[in-house]
Image (tube, rainbow, N blue to C red):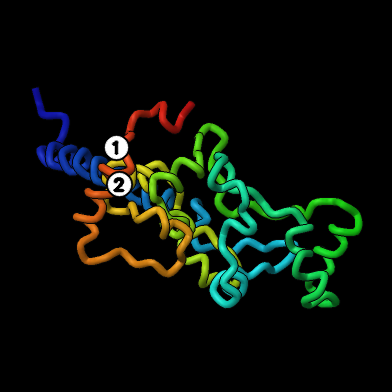
């Protein structure tokens, strides 16, 4: 019986199969890059706000502590958004006629909250408690980035699960003394591993990687 296909067909078939494997692998790699890009995660993207609030001015230049505005961060899962009355504590006297602060004055007059745009926002199926992380010695800038340098606020990190797991798997790399949690200038020392191991034991930090810890 004469041969139906040319012998080169075997070579073509093998090349096609291997080519398909590499093509699919390439697509998955590209998908992974896109999934981690700022286009998807919104990391490093400045969000437009009703009022151009500058953390750099209030935190670094004026030295206002995080807890002055985010009052519930030590006791609640939510850090808290300051009411307009907190803003007006200063701005009833300072820059009291500034045009950019008119939304603040309007909010105070009408008792209607300013609709701030969430910058660091987790999906509804993720449970996160600020107070637990604060009490365990996790600094604000570890998650929120160099807030004291932000003229306008952006999301510093992806907040993806793989990013969170870096800390949950090796908390000794990120933990700091509790008195430095709200510092925006504290730097990890050269002996961070030694310090981290010591603080991990002192603060009784566990390496929590069970799904139910965050997905409740």
- Vertical position of residue 125 compared to residue 70: above or below: above
Between 112 and 94, the one nearer to me in the picture: 94
Q: Residue at x 85, y 64 (%)?
A: 105
Q: Are marks 1 and 2 in contact (CB under 8 Å)?
A: yes
The reply, left or right, for residue 137 in relation to residue 199 is right
- The quadrant holding residue 8 is top left
Screen quadrant of the N terminus:
top left
Taking the image as shown, residue 30 lies to the left or right of residue 46, namely left
Please name the residue shown 49% across and 26% down the image: 216
**Residue 191 placement: quadrant:** bottom left
- From the top left corner, tell me how far across and down residue 63 is, in percent: 56, 72
Res. 80 mark: none
CA distance separating discs 1 and 2 = 7 Å
Q: In the displayed structure, would residue 49 be above or below residue 151? A: above
According to the image, label 1 marks what residue?
Answer: 207
In this orientation, does residue 99 appear? no
The image position of residue 27, as x and y in percent, is: 35, 46
Q: Which residue is mark 2?
A: 171
Q: Is residue 179 visible?
A: yes
Q: Secondary structure at mark 1?
A: loop
Say what secondary structure mark 2 lies in.
helix
Q: How far from the left and from the top, in percent, is residue 163?
A: 37, 48
Q: Residue at x 62, y 61 (%)?
A: 47
Q: Determine whether 87 is above or below 165 in the image.
A: below
């Amino acid at each position: 019986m004469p041969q139906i296909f040319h012998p080169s067909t075997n070579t073509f078939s093998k090349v096609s199969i291997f080519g398909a494997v590499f093509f699919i692998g390439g697509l998955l790699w590209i998908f992974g890059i896109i999934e981690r890009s700022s286009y998807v995660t919104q990391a490093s993207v400045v969000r437009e706000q009703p009022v151009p609030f500058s953390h750099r001015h209030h935190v670094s230049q004026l030295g206002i502590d995080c807890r002055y505005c985010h009052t519930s961060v030590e006791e609640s899962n939510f850090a808290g958004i300051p009411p307009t009355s907190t803003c007006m504590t200063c701005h009833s006297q300072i820059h009291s006629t500034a045009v950019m602060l008119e939304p603040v004055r309007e909010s105070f007059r009408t008792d209607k909250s300013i609709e701030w745009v969430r910058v660091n926002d987790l999906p509804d199926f993720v449970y996160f408690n600020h107070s637990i992380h604060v009490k365990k010695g996790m600094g604000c800038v570890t998650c929120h980035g160099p807030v004291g340098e932000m003229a306008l606020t952006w999301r510093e990190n992806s907040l993806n699960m793989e990013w969170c797991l870096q800390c949950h798997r090796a908390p000794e790399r990120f933990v700091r003394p509790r008195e430095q949690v709200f510092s925006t200038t504290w730097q990890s020392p050269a002996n961070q591993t030694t310090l981290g191991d010591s603080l991990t034991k002192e603060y009784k930090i566990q390496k929590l990687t069970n799904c139910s810890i965050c997905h409740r």
